[in-house]
Amino acid sequence: MGQYTRTASAAAEKAVKDIQHKTRKRYSTEDKIRIILAGLRGEDSIAELCRQEGISQGLYYSWSKEFLEAGKKRLAGDTARQASSGEVKVLRKEARDLKEVVAEQALELRLLKKACSRMGETANEKSHPREVGDYPAD
């Protein structure tokens, strides 16, 4: 076999793979769920279902595993999702701003407590209303 024949053969194989890749069917989320549920119902074998749908059994089982894992996490209450970098930046800025507000309020509270302690009894008398029995009888 000559160099030209091997090169032509490799080019032909590449062309076939490119065509297969471009014409590969894309399955929507709804299609994947429909196929997985059909497999779980067990009306047909997984092999038969995969033949009918034009997918490999390995692909079916990977979809099925993802589907069941997502359901398990959802039932366990794990609704966390991946955040985009933009969302992360916004959340970090918001957290930083909130920390500043908390720090300012903590400082203000400390200053108010210090001022009240310096005022002593007069601050305590003013801040506590009189009890019903503290009023003189007429």
Image (cartoon, grey):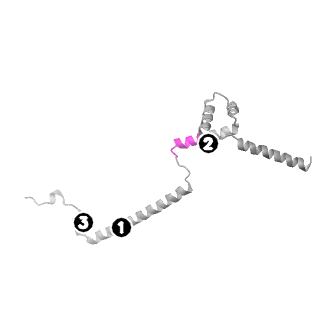
Q: Tell me the magenta residue range.
A: 66-78
Q: Earlier in the sequence, mark 1 or mark 2?
A: 2
Is 67 magenta? The answer is yes
Question: In the rendered image, which residue does mark 2 sit on?
Answer: 66
**Residue 103 picture location, percent across and down:** 41, 65
At x 39%, y 66%, the residue is 104
Q: Amino acid at mark 2?
A: Glu
Q: Earlier in the sequence, mark 2 or mark 3?
A: 2
Q: Which mark is residue 124?
A: 3
Q: CA distance from mark 3 to mark 1?
A: 19 Å
Helix, strand or loop status at disc 1: helix
Question: Neighbour class for label 2 at 10 Å: few (<14), some, many (≥20)?
Answer: few
Q: Which is in the foreground here, disc 2 or disc 3?
A: 2
**Residue 112 picture location, percent across and down:** 32, 68
Q: CA distance from mark 1 to mark 2?
A: 52 Å
Identify which residue, 131 or 89, lies in the foreground: 89
Is 121 magenta? The answer is no
Q: Which mark is residue 108?
A: 1
Q: Which is in the foreground here, disc 3 or disc 1?
A: 1
Q: In the picture provided, is 14 more to the left or to the right than 117? A: right
Q: Amino acid at mark 3?
A: Asn
Q: Earlier in the sequence, mark 3 or mark 1?
A: 1
In the rendered view, tell whether residue 138 sits above or below residue 80.
below
Q: In the picture provided, is 68 more to the left or to the right than 131? A: right
> Which image quadrant for residue 50?
top right
At x 60%, y 40%, the residue is 29
At x 89%, y 47%, the residue is 5
Helix, strand or loop status at disc 3: helix
Q: Are marks 3 and 1 in contact (CB under 8 Å)?
A: no
Identify which residue, 26 or 96, lies in the foreground: 26
**Residue 117 picture location, percent across and down:** 29, 69
Q: Are marks 1 and 2 in contact (CB under 8 Å)?
A: no
